Amino acid sequence: MADPASSPPQPSWLARLGLAFSAFSAVLGDAAFAARFAALRSGAATAAPTSPPTAPTPTPPPAPTLKTLGPEAALQLLALLQREARLIDFTRESLTGYDDAQIGAAARLVHEGCAKVLREHFEIVPVRDEAEGSRITLPAGFDAAAVRLTGQVVGAAPFKGSLTHRGWRAAEVRLPKLADGHDARVLAPAEVEL
């Protein structure tokens, strides 16, 4: 008969509820834990281990190196979008006084101008070649910067899922070179009619 003084105190109902939720999450997310839980539940592991089993600790990925880029390229792109599509004018304008047809006509011009800038200064290609809606498998070690997992992400790769968006990657950038002394912060010069 076990000595009551040596047995651990019985957890309260509220503590057991928290344990149940933790165990539920761990069983769903960790196959090794689920196997140990099943063995314990079936009676195969009746003796309490003297020390808790140690799972291998995953090595965290190294912290990304952050670099500070000059704003010139971003400002140059913004200036091109303003010049060809009047993007800044469009986004700074309040649309409450316009009807849907007027907004649609303006949006068409902005869309055409933005598309022109993208065609002339970038080669943009899909990240994935499969058609949207295709079933794909992502192997272990897939590029997590190029593919974002959505939905219920449980376990480890390989992951099987449906491609909802192909993604975009800049294969080439052709921004014009800036002359020395050019103030890239001036996105569109003020206009004065004489």
Image: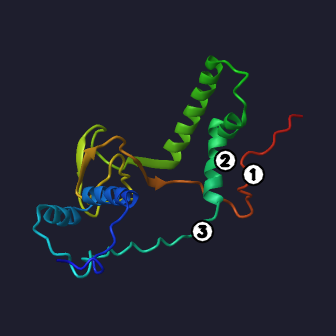
Tell me the mark number nearer the camera, choosing from 3 and 2. 3
Q: Residue type at mark 2: give it.
A: Ala
Residue 32 on image: x %, y %: 20, 66
Q: Name which residue lies at 73% across and 45% down.
A: 188
Q: Which label sits on residue 186?
A: 1
Side of 132 relative to 110 (left or right): left
Choose top left, top right, bottom left or bottom right for residue 70. bottom right
Q: Nearer the viewer, residue 131 or 32?
A: 32
Give the residue displayed 20% in from the left and 75% down from the top: 48
Instruction: Tell me how far mark 3 sits from mark 2, CA to CA.
Output: 21 Å
Q: Quadrant of residue 59?
A: bottom left
Residue at which label 2 appears: 79
Q: Position of residue 22 (x, y in %)?
A: 34, 59
Check the image and report above or below for 119 versus 56: above
Q: Secondary structure at mark 1?
A: loop
Give the residue displayed 20% in from the left and 63% down from the top.
37
The amino acid beneath tag 3 is Thr
- Tag 1: Cα neighbours inside 10 Å, few (<14), some, or many (≥20)? few
Residue name at image x 34 percent, y 71 percent: 9
Q: Earlier in the sequence, mark 2 or mark 1?
A: 2
| Amino acid type shown at disc 1 | Val
Depth check: give the residue in front, 190 or 150: 150
Where residue 185 appears, x then y in whole percent? 73, 55
Secondary structure of residue under mark 3: loop
Q: Which residue is mark 3?
A: 68
Q: CA distance from mark 2 to mark 1?
A: 8 Å
